[in-house]
Image (cartoon, grey):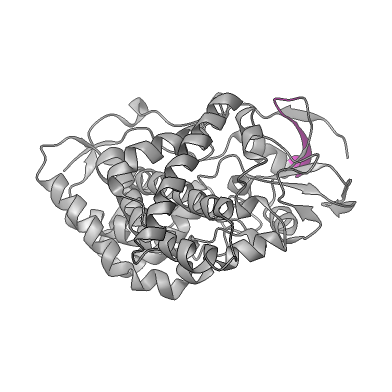
Amino acid sequence: MAESAIPLAHPETARECPFSPPPQYTARREEQPLSRVDLWNGTRPWLATRFEDVRRVLQDARFSADTSRPGYPLRSAGTKALTGGLRSFGQMDDPEHSRLRRMVNTEFTARRAETLRPQIQDVVDGLVDHMEGTAPPVDLVTEFALPTASLVISRLLGVPYEDHAFFQKQSITRLNRSVTEAEVVRAEEELSRFLNNLADKKADDPQDDLMSRLVNEREATGQLTRAETLSVVRTLLTAGHESTANMISLSTLALLQHPEQLAAVREDPTVIKSAVEELLRYLSVAQNGLSRVATEDVNVAGQLVRAGEGVICMVNTANRDPRQFDAPDDLDVRRDARRHVAFGFGIHQCVAHSLARVELQVALGTLLRRLPRLRLAVAAEDLSYSYEMVVFGVRQLPVEW
């Protein structure tokens, strides 16, 4: 197979539709499903674009998620700052990955997520109440999507919501591909200092929250170091609000742009679960994909990937693969899309996927039920999108009802 490469530039230069992956990647899926790509630092990892190959790489232990390994695909200069120090357990391999993940697994089971549904419903109802008391138009991102995700993860972790502006700012810096390494380092240091001070308070005055349990049950017994506690909490805090918030706002926009699908969700509330799975598949907001590096020679899609070579798994093109989904470019809220890879696949699948599903079900279902005349307050073509972010989303979403 030829090793011609395409540049991995910011996707705003190639996207034709904000809901769809850049057509250059879609074309590669059909023509060269495993092909070279040029990164910012001159490295040329492989780009996996088919559903079958993406799942294969993500579940194969011969592909490492360890960001400190030579050859691991670094997507921007800023990401270099995230390869050492307080790495997340998602950036580690077993046994360290499993050891740290086990510390929080019980907090994020499907059963646990369901027990949180009433609390999430209270959060969402309160935000819709506030919207109804506000003269439209309002920005759905700042008035509903971000507060929903931030309030839920703050309460679960035990991070004061009044500090949400601070941790959102640091999270945005960490996930922005256009910032410098120094800016990411500074954001990491400020967030770590904030969380360390909070951990000290939890040690003196524990509450019924995850951070208190990590500090007083895991750290105090030697199962976790303070650095590991901070790493776990920081990972959950950052990922726990940014991805969900973007999914809430972008899903709302997608439904507003597909009125027949919107009507299907409104007319039959039982459709919300399949609608959420379909929106996760259709939008695939992790636009940077998921990176791995081979630890030994492995054959993928008929191509030899040598030890030390990186692979970027594009979940957005995988989730639009016609070999797995009929009419994949159509939004169909009644589709059984549960086999999508929006949360990854294998042992590194997003630990909070069950919680995210419940949040999306409650947020979207409630919003559409309580605001039946919800509509865009601006022309769709006037909206702008966060192309520079690891997690794709719409910057503002002015709506009225």
Is residue 213 on the magenta stretch?
no
Q: Residue at x 64, y 27 (%)?
A: 77
Can you give x and y, in whole percent of width and height, for residue 67 in the image? Answer: 70, 44
Instruction: Look at the picture and state if 12 lies above or below 144.
Output: above
Q: Residue at x 60, y 29 (%)?
A: 78
Left or right relative to 166: residue 27: right
Q: Residue furthest front?
A: 204
How many marks the image carries: the answer is 0
Instruction: Look at the picture and state if 373 lies above or below 121.
Output: above
Left or right relative to 315: residue 147: left
Q: Residue at x 66, y 37 (%)?
A: 25
Can you give x and y, in whole percent of width and height, for residue 361 in the image? Answer: 35, 61
Quadrant occupied by the N terminus:
top right
Left or right relative to 160: residue 43: right
Quadrant occupied by the C terminus:
top left
Can you give x and y, in whole percent of width and height, for residue 175 in the image? Answer: 52, 36
- Over which residues does the magenta segment extend? 31-41
Q: Residue furthest bottom?
A: 111
Residue situated in front as seen by the camera: 108 or 344: 108
Does residue 48 appear in the picture of this structure?
no
Does residue 161 appear in the picture of this structure?
yes
Q: Residue at x 73, y 25 (%)?
A: 41
Residue situated in front as seen by the camera: 319 or 143: 143
Can you give x and y, in whole percent of width and height, for residue 156 in the image? Answer: 37, 60
Instruction: Look at the picture and state if 388 lies above or below 263.
Output: above
